[in-house]
Amino acid sequence: MILDLKDIFACVGETLVYEETIDLHMLDIGGFFPFQKPVTASAILSNKSGIVTVSGAAVLDYVTQCDRCAADINTKMNLPVHHILVSEINDEENYDEDFILIENMLLDITELVTSDILLQLPSKFLCSEHCKGLCASCGVNLNETDCKCDKAVDPRLEALKKLLN
């Protein structure tokens, strides 16, 4: 959704309420399409002294697999969305990279919220913090049962094993 911000930048104290349902079901993240339900995004844009702040949240459900044991993970998240929009930069030296420069008074808020979601998703998806993963030899899920595989010892460390026995 493209928002025209001319009116909000023109009037100090002006506010704009934004609500949208964003369909991300075709968004590929590492070979998975985790967003099976639409994302609900809402925000309030308000002009405070010529600077427009965006404050809101994105509520999303995603389904993916644990990176260690491949178990399905269903997660609901409520991600905050906060940005500062400016129409011009007066002082290049004091420019804060957290500011978003809106030169043509148009903001693609869907793109902004989508990038926030991608940046706030975990880099590693785990079913639990203590997930043991899969056995590298037989593939059994170590969270559910113990592995019966013989633990292969590196022949270079065989002498140390004899010392421990």
Image (cartoon, rainbow, N blue to C red):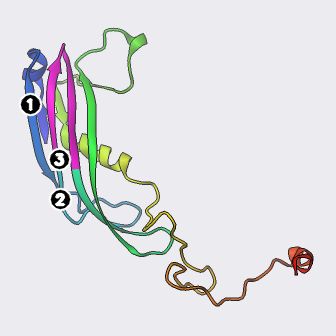
Tell me, yes or no, whether the highlighted magenta stretch contains residue 55: yes
At horizontal 14% and vertical 25% (from top left) the residue drawn is 46
**In this figure, which residue is indicated by the disc labeled 2?**
38
Q: Is residue 62 left or right of residue 134?
A: left
Res 160 quadrant in image: bottom right
Q: Is residue 17 left or right of residue 102?
A: left
- Residue 53, image x and y in percent? 21, 26
Residue extending furthest toward the front: 165
Total residue callouts: 3
Q: Disc 2 to disc 1, how far (Cα)?
A: 22 Å
- Residue 26, image x and y in percent? 25, 62
Q: Secondary structure at mark 3?
A: strand
- Residue 72, image x and y in percent? 37, 74
Res 163 quadrant in image: bottom right
At horizontal 23% and vertical 62% (from top left) the residue drawn is 25
The kind of residue tagged 3 is: Ala
**In this figure, which residue is indicated by the disc labeled 1?**
16
Residue extending furthest toward the top: 91
Mark 2, Cα crowd under 10 Å, few <14 / some 14-19 / many 20+, is some
**In this figure, which residue is indicated by the disc labeled 3?**
41
At horizontal 73% and vertical 83% (from top left) the residue drawn is 151
Task: Specify start and end residues of the magenta stretch as a single range.
Answer: 41-58
Q: Disc 3 to disc 1, how far (Cα)?
A: 14 Å
Mark 1, Cα crowd under 10 Å, few <14 / some 14-19 / many 20+, is some
Q: Earlier in the sequence, mark 3 or mark 1?
A: 1
The kind of residue tagged 1 is: Leu
Above or below for 77 versus 64: above
